[in-house]
Image (cartoon, rainbow, N blue to C red):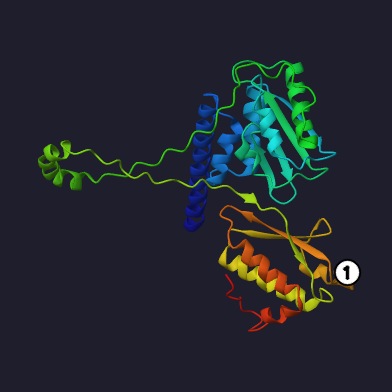
Amino acid sequence: MNAVRIHEALIQKTSFNAAVKHITTVTAIVERFEKQENLADILKEYIDEKLLTPDAALSIINLLLVNKYKYICGAKNLSTVTDSLSKIAASAIKWNAVDLVAVYHHPDLGIVIINPKNPESIAQIDRLNRFEMVTVYAGTFTKVISEETAQKAIKALVSLFETGQAKNESGLLTGSCKYQPPKPKAAAKPKVDKKTSNQKAKPAAAAKKSSQSKAAAPAPVKETVSKNRRMTPMYAVPVTNELFHNGNVEAWKRIIESYKASHPDLDVLVYYDGERIANLNSLFKWGKVKHGSVIQFAVSGENIRDVAKLQRYLAQGASPGFEAFLKGSVNSVLNLF
């Protein structure tokens, strides 16, 4: 019984600490938003740092934008899609009358939260897919937006996603919601050991006079690389074997397994004839993938690397030279990367 009570107490303590952490996170997000930072840019930072999940971020969008600040929301399944994503930010950045957040349901990456005015935020998307849903939130930082202005901004942004052109920008160009680039994250200050600093105080004071006569060299600034989960473009791999048969499938499995073993933070996504292939064995069924066919793949993750090498190996795996990847124990992982 004592063990059960201890277990329950630990669970309660863990749940309590998690709740406090979440409240602290949400409070910090609200404070930054009220200083007129775009919510999509804020949430991306927290998601990248693994402090929020995309689902939790959606809840914050609804509570903060819709419930508290009365942003107008509109959603549409895209009937067509533009292949020039850069045009979205190029147009939306001029719409000073409105603050915008868009949520795109990517078929492979899942929920992607976007600031349409931020080119780097748009770059999270490798491509747009027809029939996928985009939800747009339109409002302002300082006052409740008019229904007319919000709906015009929503329709204009959806038009950018579908055609790369906004149909009607009148009434959207003037206002207080000018685009502000995300603020760079401040580097954490190193902790100072008091005992060590006291011991060094006297020598430091003695050297102060001589150091004043010399120009102080600026301290090197360590750049912080922001985490950014993204997806590469599609890479084509031609099938040069007479048929993409079971041996080719097994070769691809072992190549991708080796890549994943070396890069566990990355995912390899395989496509054929525009369809995502979750089970590589399906490429062998009925011998549908023949000589001259093209299989595509993409890599998703934060620190994407070794894609060219992966492409070379997959090309060999789709050729008569696939047997090179079938050597060794069945349960062993190839050391390719």
Q: Is residue 257 above or below residue 2?
A: below
Q: Residue at x 65, y 59 (%)?
A: 267
Q: Between residues 255 and 139, which one lies in front from this camera angle?
A: 255
Q: Quadrant of residue 274?
A: bottom right
The residue type indicated by label 1 comes to Lys
Q: Between residues 164 and 204, which one lies in front from this camera angle?
A: 164
Total labels: the figure holds 1
In the image, residue 208 lies at what x, y percent?
14, 38
Q: Read off the residue under disc 1.
A: 288
In the image, residue 147 lies at what x, y percent?
75, 17
Specify few, some or many for label 1: CA neighbours under 10 Å numbering under 14, 14-19, or 20 or more: few
Q: Is residue 159 above or below residue 269?
A: above
Residue at the far bottom in the pictured view = 328
Q: Between residues 296 and 44, which one lies in front from this camera angle?
A: 296
Q: Residue at x 48, y 49 (%)?
A: 9
Image quarter of the C terminus: bottom right
Q: Is residue 173 left or right of residue 142?
A: right
Q: Is residue 64 left or right of residue 249?
A: left
Query: Which element carries disc 1, helix, strand or loop?
Result: loop
In the image, residue 332 lies at what x, y percent?
61, 79
Q: Quadrant of residue 297?
A: bottom right
Q: Is residue 52 left or right of residue 66?
A: left
Q: Residue at x 69, y 25 (%)?
A: 138
Q: Is residue 303 left or right of residue 213?
A: right
Q: Is residue 289 above or below residue 151?
A: below
In the image, residue 215 lies at what x, y percent?
22, 38
